[in-house]
Amino acid sequence: MWELRLYVAQRRTAMLMVPLILGHLAVIFYATGSELSASDILARTRGSIGWAAFYGAFVILAAVHGAIGVRTVLREWSPLEGRILDVIMVAFGAVLIALGARAVVAVVA
Amino acid sequence: MRKIYSMASTTTDPEMTVPQSGTLSVSVWRGGASGHYETFEVPARTNQTVLDVATWIQRNADPTLSYRFACRVGMCGSCAMMVNGRPRWTCRTHVSKVTDGGRLELGPLANLPVVKDLTADMTRFFEKWQAADGTFVPTKTRHDPIEQLSPDDPARVSANEAIECINCAVCFAACDTVRWNENYLGPAALNRAWTLINDVRDGGDAERLAAVAADGGCHACHSHQSCEQHCPKGLNPTASIAGLKRRSVRAYLRGEL
């Protein structure tokens, strides 16, 4: 039932990301509409546990969701099959988490 | 040989015996996987199915042409071919509705190995049916009373909506996921599983749900809906597969899978 688990995980992460995506869009519209500078934004986000949790969760969910999707693409569009697909999925997800964590840290630390 | 004959000698239908003007240029796949297209000039008729065209070629131009048909009335599901790049049941496909400026291209069904010419090897297609547990599992004996089924029962309505499949494999040939994922069970097998899961007389749901939720099962479907688009019976296998996804996820969340 590995495929089913991945299917459910991808749908769950998608559902959880919906409010985060809407929140992220709202932030973008607010920041650009209010003509906030980079320093204005950093002043609001630095040291904020709330923003760290918001974007930290976003990064993890996007990494899990995207990595499962990449596995499916490789399964269907490349000659790869079997265990190597899972290895690539985990590696890709880890890279996304690392890159995302780096960005979150830069904004909130 | 490209000689053009009248169809008058092969039919007694008055309309069909009236010679029509013009010819069709018909490219037909010849040989196995490494074959080629061969062009035949076939008389154009007012009422003419694609299967008529294949039959004309075999009877009048090249008797070695291999193709498959049986009932000729859209019931047996054996005459499906690729017609101008799309899978169709040829016995009920009128040439006038699919011809491209008097040109026809006939090939064996996609996503299946070619046996010869227009004949595809259906083994893989039917193996998928078995892999999806598409066999009815009886729950009663001949000594039990006949099960009373209400046609209004929601499960029966779902089963009836999907039950008229004729196993023509048009959906299998049209499916992108079948082409990309050789483990994928395909629309027809999953549609069949859905009818059985909704059949209150069937007792194989647990095993069947596990079979359709395994690797290559219903969750591999991308809902492109090519099966619905091409199904000659107007069925919607995508909806059946969506039903299997809901049912299997529910069973998984309940710890039953």
Image: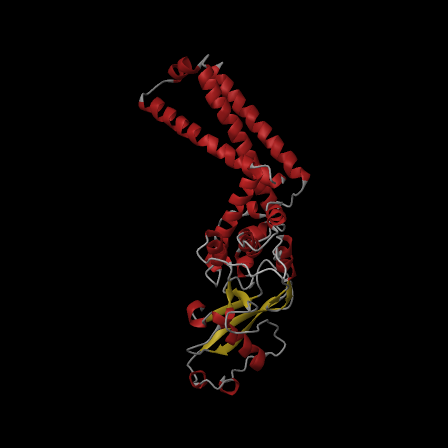
In percent of the image, x 45 and y 13: which residue is there? A46
The quadrant the N terminus of chain B occupies is bottom right
Residue A74 falls left or right of residue B230:
right
In the image, farthest residue toward the left: A34
Percent across and percent down for residue A59 are 51, 26
Query: Is B44 situated above or below B189?
Result: below
Q: Quadrant of residue B18?
A: bottom left
Query: Is B22 situated above or below A27?
Result: below
Q: Quadrant of residue B109?
A: bottom right
Residue A92 falls left or right of residue B160:
right
In percent of the image, x 50 and y 54: which residue is there? B237
A107 or B135: which is nearer to us?
B135
Count the marks.
0
Percent across and percent down for residue B220 are 56, 46
B93 or A38: which is nearer to us?
B93
Query: Is B116 situated above or below A14?
Result: below
B25 or B224: which is nearer to us?
B224
